[in-house]
Image (cartoon, rainbow, N blue to C red):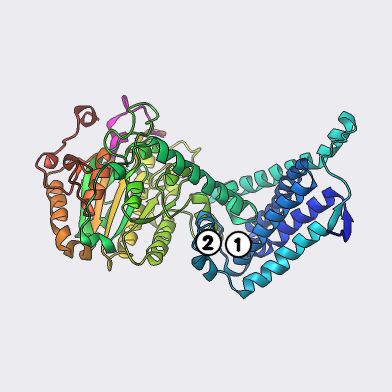
Amino acid sequence: MRSLTVFSQRQVSLALSVYIGVILNSACLVRNGISGGWLEAISALLSAVALVAFCYLLISFFSLLGQIVYKTFASFILLASAAASYYMTFFNVVIGYGVIVSTLTLDTDLNGEALGHEFFLWFLLVGLLPCLWLWCTRLLNDVYSNQWNGVGGFAKKLVPAIGMLLVLNVSIDTIVKLTKDQARKNNQYTASIGGVIAHSYLPTNWIASLAIYAHQLSKEDASAKQLYDPSSHFTYQPTPAIDNLFVVFVIGETTRWDHMGLLGYERDTTPLLSQEPNLIALRGTSCDTATKLSLRCMFVRENGTEDDDQRTLKERNVFAVMRKLGFTSELFGMQSEAWFYSSLDANSYEIREIIASEYAHSKRPIDDMLLVDQMEKSINKYQQGKHLVVLHTKGSHHLYSQRYTREFARFTPECMDIDDTCTKQQLVNSFDNSVLYIDHMLKNVFDKLRDKNALVFYIPDHGESIDENHHFHATPKEMAPPEQFRVPFIIWASDKFIAQPQHQQLFANLQKREKNNFNPHHEQIFDSLLGCIGYSSPDGGIKAQNNWCSDNPTSMAFDNHPTRLTQR
């Protein structure tokens, strides 16, 4: 190809960095910069500086591999960013994992529906023309050629990269400090600020999402080879009513049943849930005392993990089994447990930073109520039913006062800052206010599903110990106090669900257990989730004793679990 221009490789790298980091992000940077006050404006400006530095480091790295590789990878970054910028500029789309999965699908008809004439014109002008300029430019020199000219020459070549690295760190650190100071002043929760920036702008948003996608592919491959898959060893027979069923599983965080009014707590922390006629509330027991550990053991069959400290997985979880049984599924998390999210084999999932980047400049609090919006979008997307939505909340995780908005600060005084010296009563007040907000959030989940054939589960991962000026969980399970295992098990059914003849007896069996003060355990979720939505297994795929919706006399007992668990 005939060269039209001559530039040094550093000049080309810097030009591409400014083009991708600032120009292609210009609509988002301006939109975010004018969305609020001085903090938003400064953050947008510093984000632009950080993006230029990151792009320079990324593009310059490929200089180590020669000019052809350099131009090839720079072109890929440029074209991918140009394509993404079209949707970010005109539709304010957050380029997350779901977008990447949809883009890489083999369903060309679906992809074709998202590509119009305007997109191709944009891609030509913004992507292909700059790419053509790159390939028509003769590079005057390689940044990292083999001619080092000694240690001094090598060090001189590294100066721009080191400078850009310092600029990147200073810019991000400044945004983090300013945002955290403002959040602490207003007693607001902030997601990982670096993560929000990464998922808000090019090219870090699609690079991060592509990495998540690659991670999930590797996890799927590893799981298929190593973990026992119940769906491949047992027969699961559905009822016809499953075909249009919506299942929502809300994973709570740290919330205790003995702080819920509908389960006997002296304070009315659940006024909305208490009014729901189709709701079952049980005093349950968690399988462990920390989020990562409970996420391993609470969704697999009993003994589906090793009884070691790290809860080593042996089997695939119930959500992955439901996918094998024909359910579509999506997960939305206000946490970032990507290792767990990928194990669901969901059609798509979004971590906290992706969700937060979508709402970061909407003036809405970054809290669990955002998950209700995500759930509604998912339900509308899969209107045919036989669809699962998993919502992973922040729930009652400390700092408790950041889990709810000010109108839910009913119990005072509160513990308002992580550095405050707080009394036990202040901590309890704040914890109880977070339960009030969970009550509000779950009511909104139910409201979105009342006209559908739907079943909702709400079960937290573990409890919490609260005392004077300290709070804690994650105590080793062999020595943990009882309150770290106390979690509510709440099941709600829509009128349409209960109206199904196949479901009436299932729900009646749940009601019997509630009347008997039945004590469920995390280890029973696998069998009960499948059993309560209408599956049966003639060859042992569902253990009747662990199925809350069965009429098995043994499973009706107050606590039918092994002694080592009931002693918690």
Could you classify mark 1 by the number of other residues whose Cα lies within 10 Å: few (under 14), some (14-19), or many (20 or more)?
few
Label ID, residue 142: none
Q: Residue at x 21, y 31 (%)?
A: 566
Q: Residue at x 66, y 58 (%)?
A: 81
> What stretch of residues is rendered in magenta?
471-486
Above/below status of 276 relative to 468:
below
Q: Closer to the N terminus: mark 2 or mark 1?
A: 1
* Tag 2 and tag 1, C-beta contact below 8 Å: yes
Q: Position of residue 211 (x, y in %)?
A: 56, 47
Q: Residue at x 37, y 29 (%)?
A: 475
Give the secondary structure at mark 1: loop
In the image, 501 versus 132, the foreground residue is: 132
Q: Position of residue 520 (x, y in %)?
A: 21, 41
Q: Position of residue 239 (x, y in %)?
A: 20, 58
Q: Residue at x 11, y 44 (%)?
A: 552
Q: Amino acid at mark 1?
A: Gly
In the image: residue 147, left or right of residue 404: right
Q: Amino acid at mark 2?
A: Lys
**Residue 524, can we see it?**
yes
Residue under label 1: 36
**Residue 188, can we see it?**
no
Quarter residue 116 falls in: bottom right
Quarter residue 397 falls in: top left
Q: Position of residue 365 (x, y in %)?
A: 48, 57
Give the secondary structure at mark 2: loop
Could you classify mark 2 by the number of other residues whose Cα lies within 10 Å: few (under 14), some (14-19), or many (20 or more)?
few
Label ID, residue 363: 2
Considering every residue shown, the one lying at the far left of the view is 553
